[in-house]
Amino acid sequence: MFMPEGRVNVAHAPDMQQVPSPPRRLATLPPPHPEKLDRGSDGHYYNRLMPELPDLAILADAFDAALVGRRVIGAEAPGPLTVRGTPAEMAALVGQRLDRFYRRGKFLWLEFERDRIAINAMLTGRLQLAPNPGAKRPARTLFVLRFGPLEGASSHIGADWTRGAVWIPAIEDTPEMRYRDPTQMGKVYLLPSGIERAVPGAGPGDLGPDADDPELSPEVWRQRIRRHTGELKNLLRNQEFVAGIGNAYSDEILHAARLLPSRKRGTLAPEEVDELYAVTRSTLAHAITVLRDRVPPRFENEVRDFLAVHYKGGEPCPHCGQRITQTEAGGFVTSYCRHCQH
Ligand SMILES: [Zn+2]
Protein backbone atom coordinates (compact mmCIF):
# COMPACT_ATOMS: atom_id res chain seq x y z
CA MET A 1 0.00 0.00 0.00
CA PHE A 2 1.51 3.25 -1.05
CA MET A 3 -0.25 5.33 1.58
CA PRO A 4 -1.10 4.60 5.19
CA GLU A 5 -4.79 4.73 5.94
CA GLY A 6 -5.96 7.87 7.65
CA ARG A 7 -3.08 10.04 6.52
CA VAL A 8 -5.33 12.17 4.35
CA ASN A 9 -7.99 14.56 5.57
CA VAL A 10 -11.57 13.92 4.76
CA ALA A 11 -12.70 16.77 2.59
CA HIS A 12 -14.07 19.94 3.97
CA ALA A 13 -14.62 23.10 2.02
CA PRO A 14 -12.29 25.48 3.81
CA ASP A 15 -13.05 29.16 3.87
CA MET A 16 -10.40 31.16 2.04
CA GLN A 17 -10.75 33.94 4.60
CA GLN A 18 -9.43 31.66 7.30
CA VAL A 19 -5.67 31.80 7.23
CA PRO A 20 -4.34 28.52 8.60
CA SER A 21 -2.28 28.68 11.75
CA PRO A 22 1.42 28.80 11.00
CA PRO A 23 3.41 25.64 11.65
CA ARG A 24 5.17 25.61 14.97
CA ARG A 25 8.65 26.18 13.61
CA LEU A 26 7.60 29.57 12.28
CA ALA A 27 6.06 30.63 15.57
CA THR A 28 8.75 33.21 16.32
CA LEU A 29 8.06 35.08 13.08
CA PRO A 30 5.77 38.13 12.80
CA PRO A 31 1.98 37.59 12.59
CA PRO A 32 1.06 35.17 9.82
CA HIS A 33 -0.64 37.48 7.38
CA PRO A 34 -0.42 35.53 4.11
CA GLU A 35 1.70 38.17 2.43
CA LYS A 36 3.53 39.49 5.45
CA LEU A 37 5.53 36.50 6.60
CA ASP A 38 9.10 37.55 7.10
CA ARG A 39 12.30 35.59 6.80
CA GLY A 40 11.80 31.90 7.46
CA SER A 41 14.25 29.64 9.19
CA ASP A 42 15.58 28.62 5.77
CA GLY A 43 16.56 32.23 5.09
CA HIS A 44 13.90 32.98 2.48
CA TYR A 45 11.63 36.00 2.62
CA TYR A 46 8.32 34.27 2.08
CA ASN A 47 6.31 37.35 1.26
CA ARG A 48 8.30 38.01 -1.90
CA LEU A 49 7.85 34.49 -3.20
CA MET A 50 4.15 33.91 -3.72
CA PRO A 51 3.79 32.35 -7.16
CA GLU A 52 1.94 34.39 -9.77
CA LEU A 53 0.93 33.96 -13.39
CA PRO A 54 4.42 33.92 -14.95
CA ASP A 55 5.79 31.45 -12.38
CA LEU A 56 2.82 29.14 -12.72
CA ALA A 57 2.74 29.41 -16.52
CA ILE A 58 6.26 27.93 -16.62
CA LEU A 59 5.26 25.12 -14.27
CA ALA A 60 2.11 24.27 -16.21
CA ASP A 61 3.93 24.10 -19.56
CA ALA A 62 6.80 22.09 -18.13
CA PHE A 63 4.76 19.55 -16.23
CA ASP A 64 2.39 19.19 -19.15
CA ALA A 65 5.30 18.40 -21.46
CA ALA A 66 6.96 16.06 -18.94
CA LEU A 67 4.02 14.09 -17.58
CA VAL A 68 1.05 14.05 -19.96
CA GLY A 69 0.57 10.62 -21.52
CA ARG A 70 1.89 8.80 -18.43
CA ARG A 71 -0.20 6.83 -15.94
CA VAL A 72 -0.10 7.34 -12.19
CA ILE A 73 1.64 4.38 -10.54
CA GLY A 74 1.69 5.73 -7.00
CA ALA A 75 0.29 8.56 -4.85
CA GLU A 76 1.43 9.59 -1.41
CA ALA A 77 0.53 12.35 1.05
CA PRO A 78 3.30 12.79 3.62
CA GLY A 79 1.60 16.09 4.58
CA PRO A 80 -1.92 15.04 5.55
CA LEU A 81 -3.27 18.58 6.11
CA THR A 82 -2.41 19.61 2.57
CA VAL A 83 -4.68 17.20 0.72
CA ARG A 84 -8.43 17.73 0.50
CA GLY A 85 -9.72 14.28 -0.31
CA THR A 86 -9.96 10.76 1.06
CA PRO A 87 -7.40 7.94 0.97
CA ALA A 88 -9.74 6.02 -1.33
CA GLU A 89 -9.88 8.94 -3.73
CA MET A 90 -6.12 9.15 -3.78
CA ALA A 91 -5.78 5.42 -4.37
CA ALA A 92 -8.22 5.73 -7.27
CA LEU A 93 -5.78 7.99 -9.13
CA VAL A 94 -3.48 5.03 -9.67
CA GLY A 95 -3.85 3.68 -13.18
CA GLN A 96 -5.27 6.90 -14.63
CA ARG A 97 -3.43 8.60 -17.48
CA LEU A 98 -2.68 12.31 -17.18
CA ASP A 99 -4.30 14.07 -20.12
CA ARG A 100 -3.66 17.74 -19.35
CA PHE A 101 -1.76 19.98 -16.93
CA TYR A 102 -2.64 23.67 -17.07
CA ARG A 103 -2.89 26.93 -15.15
CA ARG A 104 -5.99 29.04 -14.47
CA GLY A 105 -5.51 32.16 -12.32
CA LYS A 106 -3.14 31.15 -9.55
CA PHE A 107 -4.30 27.52 -9.63
CA LEU A 108 -2.71 24.53 -11.33
CA TRP A 109 -5.03 21.84 -12.71
CA LEU A 110 -4.29 18.23 -13.54
CA GLU A 111 -6.82 16.41 -15.70
CA PHE A 112 -6.67 12.64 -15.67
CA GLU A 113 -8.75 10.21 -17.68
CA ARG A 114 -11.51 10.36 -15.08
CA ASP A 115 -10.59 12.57 -12.13
CA ARG A 116 -8.99 15.97 -11.62
CA ILE A 117 -6.66 17.66 -9.13
CA ALA A 118 -6.41 21.39 -8.36
CA ILE A 119 -3.37 22.85 -6.62
CA ASN A 120 -3.42 26.22 -4.86
CA ALA A 121 0.20 26.82 -3.91
CA MET A 122 -0.61 29.92 -1.80
CA LEU A 123 2.60 31.36 -0.35
CA THR A 124 5.30 28.78 -0.49
CA GLY A 125 3.95 25.73 -2.29
CA ARG A 126 6.36 24.57 -4.99
CA LEU A 127 6.44 21.70 -7.46
CA GLN A 128 9.49 19.61 -8.14
CA LEU A 129 9.95 17.38 -11.16
CA ALA A 130 12.01 14.42 -10.03
CA PRO A 131 13.38 12.38 -12.95
CA ASN A 132 13.05 9.19 -10.89
CA PRO A 133 11.79 8.18 -7.45
CA GLY A 134 15.34 7.84 -6.16
CA ALA A 135 16.08 11.56 -6.51
CA LYS A 136 16.44 13.18 -3.09
CA ARG A 137 13.13 14.48 -1.75
CA PRO A 138 13.14 18.07 -0.48
CA ALA A 139 12.13 18.75 3.10
CA ARG A 140 8.42 19.42 3.60
CA THR A 141 7.36 17.37 0.61
CA LEU A 142 3.64 17.00 1.29
CA PHE A 143 2.19 15.32 -1.81
CA VAL A 144 3.75 13.02 -4.41
CA LEU A 145 2.45 11.54 -7.64
CA ARG A 146 4.60 8.90 -9.31
CA PHE A 147 4.18 8.34 -13.02
CA GLY A 148 4.95 5.33 -15.18
CA PRO A 149 6.69 5.22 -18.57
CA LEU A 150 5.31 7.28 -21.43
CA GLU A 151 2.80 5.20 -23.34
CA GLY A 152 3.88 4.33 -26.85
CA ALA A 153 0.73 5.68 -28.45
CA SER A 154 1.03 9.07 -26.81
CA SER A 155 1.25 11.83 -29.36
CA HIS A 156 1.10 14.70 -26.91
CA ILE A 157 2.93 17.79 -28.06
CA GLY A 158 3.93 20.21 -25.32
CA ALA A 159 4.47 23.97 -25.54
CA ASP A 160 7.02 25.00 -28.18
CA TRP A 161 9.60 26.17 -25.68
CA THR A 162 9.68 22.76 -23.94
CA ARG A 163 10.51 20.72 -27.08
CA GLY A 164 13.72 18.79 -26.77
CA ALA A 165 14.41 20.10 -23.27
CA VAL A 166 16.95 17.98 -21.39
CA TRP A 167 14.76 17.88 -18.27
CA ILE A 168 11.90 16.04 -20.00
CA PRO A 169 11.98 12.47 -18.66
CA ALA A 170 12.94 9.68 -21.03
CA ILE A 171 10.13 7.45 -22.28
CA GLU A 172 10.96 4.63 -19.88
CA ASP A 173 11.53 6.86 -16.81
CA THR A 174 9.18 6.89 -13.83
CA PRO A 175 9.20 10.57 -12.82
CA GLU A 176 7.58 12.07 -9.74
CA MET A 177 5.67 15.29 -9.28
CA ARG A 178 6.42 16.45 -5.76
CA TYR A 179 4.63 19.24 -3.96
CA ARG A 180 6.57 20.85 -1.13
CA ASP A 181 5.39 23.67 1.09
CA PRO A 182 7.39 24.95 4.10
CA THR A 183 4.47 26.98 5.50
CA GLN A 184 1.89 24.28 4.65
CA MET A 185 -0.60 26.93 3.60
CA GLY A 186 -1.24 25.58 0.12
CA LYS A 187 -3.82 22.94 -0.72
CA VAL A 188 -4.13 20.01 -3.10
CA TYR A 189 -7.78 19.30 -3.97
CA LEU A 190 -8.68 15.82 -5.19
CA LEU A 191 -11.67 16.15 -7.49
CA PRO A 192 -13.01 12.71 -8.38
CA SER A 193 -15.48 12.52 -11.20
CA GLY A 194 -19.01 12.80 -9.82
CA ILE A 195 -18.00 14.30 -6.47
CA GLU A 196 -18.83 17.93 -5.73
CA ARG A 197 -15.97 19.60 -3.89
CA ALA A 198 -15.46 23.35 -3.76
CA VAL A 199 -12.07 24.78 -4.69
CA PRO A 200 -12.17 28.10 -2.83
CA GLY A 201 -11.12 30.99 -5.03
CA ALA A 202 -11.47 29.01 -8.25
CA GLY A 203 -15.25 28.97 -8.58
CA PRO A 204 -17.13 30.37 -11.57
CA GLY A 205 -17.62 33.80 -9.96
CA ASP A 206 -14.16 34.02 -8.41
CA LEU A 207 -11.97 34.44 -11.46
CA GLY A 208 -12.03 36.93 -14.29
CA PRO A 209 -10.24 36.12 -17.53
CA ASP A 210 -6.56 35.30 -17.18
CA ALA A 211 -4.41 38.40 -17.56
CA ASP A 212 -2.68 36.75 -20.53
CA ASP A 213 -5.83 35.28 -22.08
CA PRO A 214 -5.87 35.98 -25.85
CA GLU A 215 -9.59 36.72 -25.52
CA LEU A 216 -8.90 39.54 -23.06
CA SER A 217 -8.90 42.23 -25.73
CA PRO A 218 -8.45 45.98 -25.07
CA GLU A 219 -12.22 46.33 -25.45
CA VAL A 220 -12.94 43.63 -22.84
CA TRP A 221 -10.35 45.23 -20.54
CA ARG A 222 -12.03 48.65 -20.88
CA GLN A 223 -15.43 47.16 -20.09
CA ARG A 224 -14.22 45.19 -17.07
CA ILE A 225 -12.17 48.03 -15.57
CA ARG A 226 -15.18 50.38 -15.49
CA ARG A 227 -16.65 48.46 -12.56
CA HIS A 228 -13.63 49.26 -10.40
CA THR A 229 -12.84 52.69 -9.04
CA GLY A 230 -10.25 51.94 -6.35
CA GLU A 231 -6.47 51.94 -6.18
CA LEU A 232 -4.63 50.44 -9.10
CA LYS A 233 -2.53 48.01 -7.08
CA ASN A 234 -5.67 46.51 -5.55
CA LEU A 235 -7.34 46.44 -8.95
CA LEU A 236 -4.55 44.44 -10.57
CA ARG A 237 -4.48 41.99 -7.66
CA ASN A 238 -8.23 41.52 -7.78
CA GLN A 239 -8.72 38.04 -9.28
CA GLU A 240 -12.29 38.87 -10.25
CA PHE A 241 -11.01 41.65 -12.50
CA VAL A 242 -8.28 39.64 -14.19
CA ALA A 243 -6.72 36.47 -12.82
CA GLY A 244 -3.11 35.59 -12.10
CA ILE A 245 -1.53 38.85 -10.91
CA GLY A 246 -0.39 39.24 -7.30
CA ASN A 247 1.76 41.48 -5.18
CA ALA A 248 4.99 41.28 -7.16
CA TYR A 249 3.75 41.65 -10.71
CA SER A 250 1.25 44.38 -9.81
CA ASP A 251 4.26 46.46 -8.68
CA GLU A 252 6.14 45.61 -11.86
CA ILE A 253 3.22 46.48 -14.14
CA LEU A 254 2.54 49.81 -12.43
CA HIS A 255 6.22 50.76 -12.56
CA ALA A 256 6.34 49.97 -16.27
CA ALA A 257 3.13 51.97 -16.80
CA ARG A 258 4.55 54.87 -14.68
CA LEU A 259 1.42 54.84 -12.53
CA LEU A 260 1.43 55.02 -8.73
CA PRO A 261 0.05 51.96 -6.89
CA SER A 262 -2.26 54.26 -4.90
CA ARG A 263 -3.60 56.03 -7.97
CA LYS A 264 -7.37 55.61 -8.27
CA ARG A 265 -8.64 53.92 -11.39
CA GLY A 266 -11.34 56.57 -11.71
CA THR A 267 -8.65 59.22 -12.35
CA LEU A 268 -7.19 57.44 -15.38
CA ALA A 269 -7.67 58.97 -18.80
CA PRO A 270 -8.89 56.55 -21.51
CA GLU A 271 -5.41 56.38 -23.02
CA GLU A 272 -3.98 55.49 -19.60
CA VAL A 273 -6.47 52.62 -19.31
CA ASP A 274 -5.27 51.34 -22.69
CA GLU A 275 -1.64 51.83 -21.74
CA LEU A 276 -2.19 49.84 -18.55
CA TYR A 277 -3.59 47.00 -20.66
CA ALA A 278 -0.62 47.01 -23.03
CA VAL A 279 1.92 47.16 -20.20
CA THR A 280 0.17 44.37 -18.27
CA ARG A 281 0.47 42.10 -21.28
CA SER A 282 4.06 43.04 -22.12
CA THR A 283 5.28 42.82 -18.50
CA LEU A 284 3.85 39.32 -18.05
CA ALA A 285 5.09 38.18 -21.47
CA HIS A 286 8.59 39.44 -20.72
CA ALA A 287 8.65 37.69 -17.34
CA ILE A 288 7.52 34.41 -18.91
CA THR A 289 10.30 34.67 -21.52
CA VAL A 290 12.91 35.26 -18.81
CA LEU A 291 11.60 32.46 -16.60
CA ARG A 292 11.60 29.90 -19.44
CA ASP A 293 15.37 30.33 -19.56
CA ARG A 294 16.01 30.71 -15.86
CA VAL A 295 13.72 28.30 -14.00
CA PRO A 296 14.16 24.82 -15.53
CA PRO A 297 15.08 22.26 -14.43
CA ARG A 298 14.71 23.44 -10.84
CA PHE A 299 11.02 24.21 -10.99
CA GLU A 300 10.84 24.41 -7.20
CA ASN A 301 12.93 27.60 -7.24
CA GLU A 302 11.27 30.92 -7.83
CA VAL A 303 13.27 33.46 -9.82
CA ARG A 304 12.54 37.10 -8.98
CA ASP A 305 15.93 38.81 -9.15
CA PHE A 306 15.21 40.28 -12.60
CA LEU A 307 12.24 42.34 -11.40
CA ALA A 308 12.60 46.12 -11.72
CA VAL A 309 11.10 47.36 -8.44
CA HIS A 310 9.29 44.76 -6.37
CA TYR A 311 11.09 44.20 -3.09
CA LYS A 312 13.92 46.46 -4.21
CA GLY A 313 13.30 49.34 -1.80
CA GLY A 314 16.34 51.64 -1.54
CA GLU A 315 17.89 50.40 -4.77
CA PRO A 316 18.10 52.66 -7.83
CA CYS A 317 15.09 52.78 -10.13
CA PRO A 318 16.09 51.29 -13.50
CA HIS A 319 14.29 54.15 -15.27
CA CYS A 320 15.51 57.23 -13.44
CA GLY A 321 18.17 56.12 -10.96
CA GLN A 322 16.36 57.53 -7.91
CA ARG A 323 15.81 55.31 -4.90
CA ILE A 324 12.85 52.94 -4.99
CA THR A 325 10.29 53.52 -2.23
CA GLN A 326 8.94 50.55 -0.30
CA THR A 327 5.97 50.44 2.06
CA GLU A 328 4.17 47.72 3.96
CA ALA A 329 0.79 49.40 4.12
CA GLY A 330 -2.17 47.03 4.19
CA GLY A 331 -0.05 44.08 5.29
CA PHE A 332 1.89 43.58 2.08
CA VAL A 333 5.01 45.05 0.54
CA THR A 334 4.58 47.64 -2.19
CA SER A 335 7.58 48.96 -4.10
CA TYR A 336 7.46 51.89 -6.51
CA CYS A 337 9.37 54.93 -7.77
CA ARG A 338 8.11 58.27 -6.50
CA HIS A 339 9.93 60.04 -9.29
CA CYS A 340 8.65 58.31 -12.37
CA GLN A 341 5.27 56.94 -11.25
CA HIS A 342 2.37 59.38 -11.03
ZN1 LIG B 1 12.11 56.00 -11.36
Image: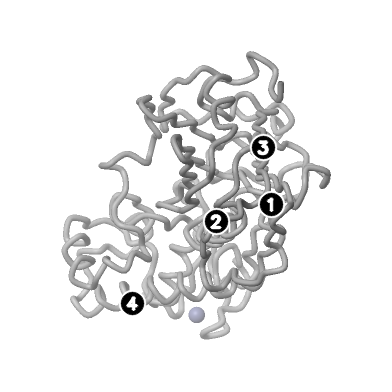
| Other-residue count near label 1 (Cα within 10 Å), few / some / many at <14 / 14–19 / ≥20 | many
Looking at the picture, tell me which residue is in the foreground, 187 or 323: 187
Q: CA distance from mark 3 to mark 2?
A: 23 Å
Label 2 secondary element: loop
What residue lies at 44% left-to-right and 35% top-to-bottom?
114
Q: Amino acid at mark 1?
A: Leu
Dot 4 and dot 3 residues touching (CB under 8 Å): no
Dot 3 and dot 2 residues touching (CB under 8 Å): no
| Other-residue count near label 2 (Cα within 10 Å), few / some / many at <14 / 14–19 / ≥20 | few
What residue lies at 67% left-to-right and 33% top-to-bottom?
74
Q: CA distance from mark 4 to mark 2?
A: 38 Å
Q: Earlier in the sequence, mark 3 or mark 1?
A: 1
Residue at the extreme bottom? 320
Q: Which residue is mark 3?
A: 144
Q: How many marks?
A: 4
Q: Earlier in the sequence, mark 4 or mark 3?
A: 3
Placement of the N terminus among the 4 image quadrants: top right
Q: Which residue is mark 1?
A: 129
Label drawn at residue 278: 4
Q: CA distance from mark 1 to mark 2?
A: 20 Å
Q: CA distance from mark 4 to mark 3?
A: 39 Å
Q: Which residue is mark 2?
A: 154
Q: Earlier in the sequence, mark 1 or mark 4?
A: 1
